Amino acid sequence: MNPEVIFNQVYDILVEHVGASPSKDQRESFVHYFIESRSAVEWRFCGNLGFGGKLYRLYQHYYVSYYPEDRTAERDAALVKANELLKAIPYWCPPPKYD
C-alpha cells in the first residue's frame, strides 16, 4: 500500500475518533513527517485527548495515548476505538538511507 494512503487513513482516524485538527495543513504536515523520516515515532495532535494526545509509530504498529492525569471515561473509550481501528492499518516506515 502507498505510504501516502496509509498515513491519510491514520489521520482520518485521528480526526474522526480523537479530535485531531481537520486542517489540510496539519494533515499534510503529518503525512509528510511520517513518510520522510525514519526517526518519526510520535505526533502530538492533542485533540479530544488533551495536550498529551499523541500518535506513536513504534514496535511495528501505530497507537494513540495521552497523559494519565487527563484520563476520563470518554477519553478512554475514544482511545480504545482509535487503537482498534489503527490495528487494521498496515505498518510502514521509510527504508534506511545509506550514504
Image (spheres, rainbow, N blue to C red):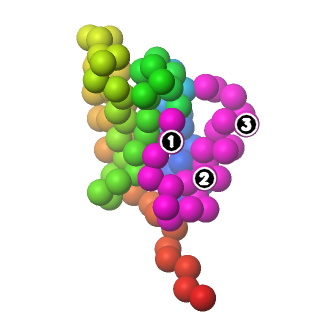
Q: CA distance from mark 1 to mark 2?
A: 9 Å
Residue 9 showing in the rendered view: no
- Tell me whether the residue at label 1 lies in contact with that at label 2, contact meaning CB atoms closer than 8 angstroms: yes
Q: Which disc number belongs to residue 59? A: none
Residue 16: image x %, image y %? 50, 24
Q: Quadrant of residue 18?
A: top left
Of the numbered discs 3 and 1, the one sitting upstream in the chain is 3
Amino acid type of the residue tagged 2 in the rendering: Tyr
Amino acid type of the residue tagged 1 in the rendering: Trp
Q: Residues within 10 Å of mark 1 (few under 14, many from 20)?
A: some
Q: Residue at x 36, y 28 (%)?
A: 66
Task: Name the residue nearer the viewer: 52 or 47.
Answer: 52
Q: Position of residue 48 (x, y in %)?
A: 46, 17
Q: Is residue 78 left or right of residue 6?
A: left
In the rendered structure, which segment of residues is drawn in magenta? 21-44
Residue 43, numbered label: 1
| For residue 68, above or below residue 95 | above
Residue drawn 30% across the image and 18% down it: 69
At label 3, which amino acid type do we have?
Asp
Magenta segment: does it hold 26? Answer: yes
Q: Earlier in the sequence, mark 1 or mark 2?
A: 2
**Residue placed under numbered mark 2 in the picture:** 33
Judged from this view, the residue extending furthest toward the front is 69
Q: Is residue 9 above or below residue 19?
A: below
In three-dimensional space, the C-alpha distance between marks 3 and 1, rounded to whole angstroms, equals 14 Å
